[in-house]
Image (cartoon, rainbow, N blue to C red):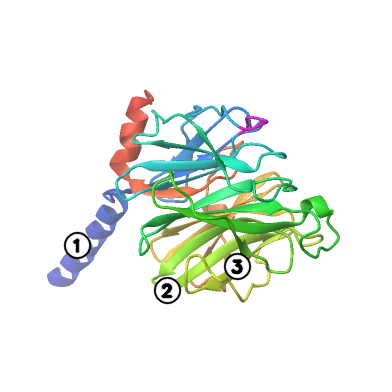
Amino acid sequence: MKRTLFTILSGFLLMICFTSCSSKAYLFTSFHEPADQGLRMLYSYDGYKWKDLDTVLLKPEIGQQKVMRDPSMVQGPDGTFHLVWTSSWRGDKGFGYASSKDLVHWTPQRFISVMEQEPTTVNVWAPELFYDEEARQYLIIWASTIPGRFERGQEADSNNHRMYITSTPDFQTFSKTQLFLDPGFSVIDAQIVKRVKDNYVLVLKDNTRPERNIKVAFADKPAGPYKNVSPPFTEPFTEGPNVVKVKNKWLIYFDSYRNKTYEAVSTADFVHFENINQQIQIPTGHKHGTIVPVKKKTVKKLLKQLGR
């Protein structure tokens, strides 16, 4: 009996320690409307309940409209944080870029031109970063419209997006821009997710009318080709999916913009999805960016630097 009680207590204490003593935390890049304010971030210690740092970390200075929408961030193997963002609704043929060691002090902002070879390009939306560990390079994907290039549905030709890609080892040299995804419909807001080696998922928004919902596709390489696009797992008028793995579940956050709510589902296999809206807490005003797993001490240091 004593041994059984000891075993139960030990397991309980281990569970408490695992929950409270975990060294992992999460940052969620964000922006508020109007999008000219700049980079904001949420933080979380469990991936479900988020708090706002409640400050602007980087004010946009480049692009025709000088906005900062859809900020995407990854932490490189040397600890440097790399950030890209949408710099204009229309007219820009590239996106913004800056990097930081501590998320407070940033390098001078640069405009990365990626669609100059296509002079009729309407836009460059929601650049998304992915670090390819095997190839030791960063992949950047984004949505652009080139009128007349692809078949379209009900949406206007100026809103008929496809996904494009470039790669870079150092954010100084970039590969030639290539078409990344043409699923046969207008697509935006895509994010590459690595499950295990040679097993990747692309979470994307089908931007056609009347769809405007979120789906997934699959590949054995991060740059694709991605195939087997799934049925939607969200309602219409949803966008900006962002994925993070917490324990044995993948959480997919997204903006339900018609309802003006931020929502989430969880999945273990990217086939079956469970609504977890009752388990999450997202501050009002948050708009979609990306989630970056970090060490807990990174968040605590950032809070201290900001006087929180």
Measured Cα–Cα span from mark 2 to mark 3? 16 Å
Vertical position of residue 203 compared to residue 118: above or below: below
Q: Is residue 134 left or right of residue 69?
A: left
Q: CA distance from mark 1 to mark 3?
A: 41 Å
User: Which sits in the foreground, 247 or 281?
Assistant: 247
Residue located beneath label 2 in the image: 198
- Residue situated furthest top in the rendering: 307
Question: Which residue sits at x=51%, y=48%?
Answer: 290
The amino acid sitting under disc 1 is Ser
Q: How many marks?
A: 3
Tag 1 residue: 10
The image's mark for residue 109 is none
User: Within 10 Å of the Cα at label 2, are there few (<14), some (14-19), or many (20+) other Cα atoms?
Assistant: few
* Quadrant in the picture for the N terminus: bottom left
Residue under the point 77% across and 56% down: 160
- In x, y percent, where is residue 74? 43, 48
Please tell me which of labels 1 and 3 falls first in the chain. 1
* Lateral position of residue 224 relative to residue 256, left or right: left
Q: Does 47 appear above or below 102?
A: below
Circle 2: residue type? Asp
Instruction: Please tell me which of labels 2 and 3 falls first in the chain.
Output: 2
Residue at the spot of label 3:
216
Residue 28 on the magenta span: no
Q: Nearer the viewer, residue 12 or 156?
A: 156
Q: Label 3's element?
A: strand
